Image (tube, rainbow, N blue to C red):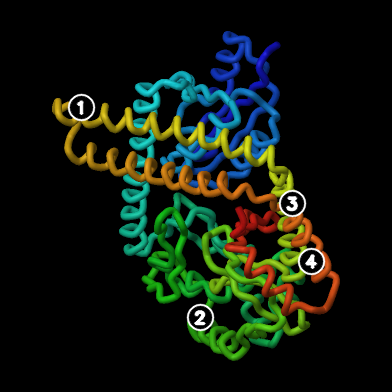
Amino acid sequence: MKKRTVIYIRESTNFQDPESQYQECLAFCEKNDFEVIKKYQDIASGKSNTRKEFLQMQQDMEDDLFDVVILWELSRSTRDFITYKLMIQRMFELNIELYSLQEGKLTEDNIDNEFSNDIRALVNSHERKRVSRRVKFRKQYTKSQGIWTGGVAPLGYKLINSKLVIDDKEAPKVKEIFQLYIEGNSYTAIAKKFGFQDSKKIVRMLANPIYIGKLKQNETEMINDKRVYHSDYKTVQGKHEPIISEEIFNLCAIIRKSNPKTPYSKNNFILKNVIDYNGQRMYPYIKSNQKSYYSGRNGNSYISTEYLEKTVIKELTEEINKFTILDDINTQHENILNRKVFYSAELSKLKNKEEKLLRLYLNDNISEEKFNALIDEIKSSMKNYEKHLEELSVLEKQQINAKNNCQLLQEYLIHLQNTSDRESLKKLLNAIIFEIRLINDFRVIVVTNLF
């Protein structure tokens, strides 16, 4: 029987050629008698771990929909070393094979190959950060000269030879939007008039100094692969012409400050530690029509409170259902033993890798800097596995049957959801939930404090 096989393709931009990758992967599958059942493809940076198809592939992997994953090159999966190690570890656990046309079989149980692949993954991670830093400095310098570096031109402008030029057809819309806001029209009403689905576009336009001939500088930066927004950014004089006068722009700013978001009442909201897909904390607010929502401080992301609560409780209920699968004593015991065997085997591999790395260092085959970096990574992993083994030993001694507790927790959660006792529901959710993270505008991941 042929192995069920999927192909993952990734390119950073649309200007590259993902089709050639795909055809080479197809040829590899045909040569090795693999049955290709699906293709996943992303046009995104390898540093991003929220790529839609990449996440879908991991979900399908958990659902046992395939046996083999084919990559054109290791760096196509991810340029983040930690993500790579977690993915490889999970594939080992699920008995999924991973092949790269350039590096060969990546899930082969061979210490030498694993060590080589780890080095490649570290190099990919380092290269990604080096390129990102170079691009960042280049953009900062270019923008400091007043030159547009933001990609797609904002409404009212068009790009000619990579320079912002006023679009005579669209610029009147920009002027009208500012004028309508000054006259007292709401963001929603203005957005509706111009056919914008999201009123946040109007909010961003009214606060964007590009319309008075200036550019934002150092508004955002990537810290630990998370985009951080700075409210104290600076502006520089741009090379482009303004559409709006500074008097009108400043008047809109005064009006915005006089109509701030309504802060939330703690008694009306039951969720905390809500993080958006940019890694920013979200806070609850109430609109003038009394509809509540969670939003980031920069206003770039928001989600309805009603939808978020329903989704979180649904996710939590399903998560509790998953826990009950392991509640039977025999099943739990077998699961603990399997995990102990796996962690012990991984720990043994790391010890062998540590010894081999030490020999390489003593024989002057690798530099001290690289040795220190790799040995720290190995020791950190060993420490994690030792911690897992200690936790499993405690569980093995206790042999807790949590079936009744899970059922009671689930029943109580459903009961509170259908009552007006929101304070009790809030206390329960805050005790269970560690963090709520948005993957996109509709998908939510709930990280719990439960095992």
Label 3–label 4 contact, CB within 8 A: no
Label 3–label 1 contact, CB within 8 A: no
Disc 3 marks which residue?
Answer: 403
* Residue toward you, 66 or 353: 353
Disc 1 marks which residue?
Answer: 359
Q: Secondary structure at mark 1?
A: helix
Q: Earlier in the sequence, mark 3 or mark 4?
A: 3
**Three-letter code for the amino acid on which mark 1 is drawn:** Arg
Question: Comparing marks 4 and 1, which lies closer to the viewer?
Answer: 4
The quarter of the picture where residue 119 lies is: top left
Q: Is residue 330 above or below residue 309?
A: above
Q: Is residue 173 visible?
A: no
Q: CA distance from mark 3 to mark 1?
A: 50 Å
Disc 2 marks which residue?
Answer: 245
Q: Earlier in the sequence, mark 2 or mark 4?
A: 2
Question: Comparing marks 3 and 1, which lies closer to the viewer?
Answer: 3
At a point 72% along the width and 54% down the height, the residue shown is 320
Label 2–label 4 contact, CB within 8 A: no
**Three-letter code for the amino acid on which mark 4 is drawn:** Tyr
Q: x%, y% of residue 34?
A: 63, 14
Question: Comparing marks 3 and 4, which lies closer to the viewer?
Answer: 3
* Residue toward you, 392 or 141: 392
Q: Earlier in the sequence, mark 2 or mark 1?
A: 2
Q: Is residue 57 above or below residue 234?
A: above
Q: Earlier in the sequence, mark 3 or mark 2?
A: 2
Disc 4 marks which residue?
Answer: 412
Position of the N terminus, as image quadrant, is: top right
At a point 32% along the width and 53% down the height, the residue shown is 138
